[in-house]
Image: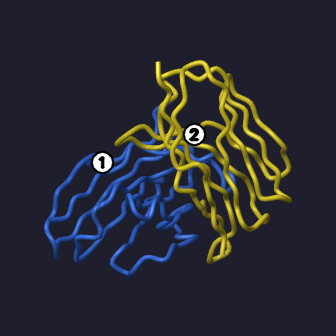
Chain colours: A blue, B yellow
Amino acid sequence: KAGVTQTPRYLIKTRGQQVTLSCSPISGHRSVSWYQQTPGQGLQFLFEYFSETQRNKGNFPGRFSGRQFSNSRSEMNVSTLELGDSALYLCASSFGSTGELFFGEGSRLTVL
Amino acid sequence: KQEVTQIPAALSVPEGENLVLNCSFTDSAIYNLQWFRQDPGKGLTSLLLIQSSQREQTSGRLNASLDKSSGRSTLYIAASQPGDSATYLCAVRVLGQGGSEKLVFGKGTKLTVNP
């Protein structure tokens, strides 16, 4: 059974650009959540989607957005990139709302 | 606001030692608690999930306990090996904004097992 797949694994952008990250959950999982990991702040919750609906959102500015498709794949977008957006972005999927979370390898974003 | 604390931030032990990692949380209203390990530059690997109604879970050399009333969880690693070297994170599932759940993570304990 394939795990959670995130693409791209690494990317470099410049300030002001935008970026889109993709996440394919484990087959059968309908919940997808996104986290940002930085050395200073640790892991912080961005948002969660279930059946194409955003159910929960963390304390991030509106530049961070996401969506989920009918096949449960999810994308997150960051517009007008800032240096502080450099981080490892992790996606996780679960079968139900309180089920065990399984994470992908992450997308490492560097903003120059 | 739920806060999760992991102490110590780093731990170095000789191979073969039994060790305990600690996790504390400020609000006992949790759905479950999950322990993860993270290798450098990698994603998180789920180790153990304890539902709020459970007291402990075991998997191989790992045993995790949960005491909701005191806001504590421990991860016990028996007979540690160099391959156990990683950062260990605990996370609690809580009710977030919008009425659905989210995970709140601790900052992790970086474990080094020396041969």
* Quarter of the image with the N terminus of chain B in it: bottom right
B30 relative position to A111: left or right: right
Circles 1 and 2 on the same chain: no
Say which chain tag 2 marks.
B
* Position above or below: A95 against B114: below
Mark 1 — residue? A7
Q: What's the residue at 76%, 53% (across, down)?
A: B72
* Position above or below: A15 against B23: below
Find numbered disc 1 in the image and state the secondary structure of the residue it sits on.
strand
What x and y, as percent, mark residue A48?
53, 64
Quadrant of the rendered structure where residue A97 is? bottom right
What x and y, as percent, mark residue B12?
51, 34
At label 2, counting other C-alpha atoms closer than 10 Å, the crowd grade (few under 14, some 14-19, many 20 or more) is some
What x and y, as percent, mark residue A71?
46, 52
Mark 2 — residue? B46
Q: What's the residue at 85%, 50% (across, down)?
A: B53
Q: Amino acid at mark 1?
A: Thr
Find numbered disc 2 in the image and state the secondary structure of the residue it sits on.
strand
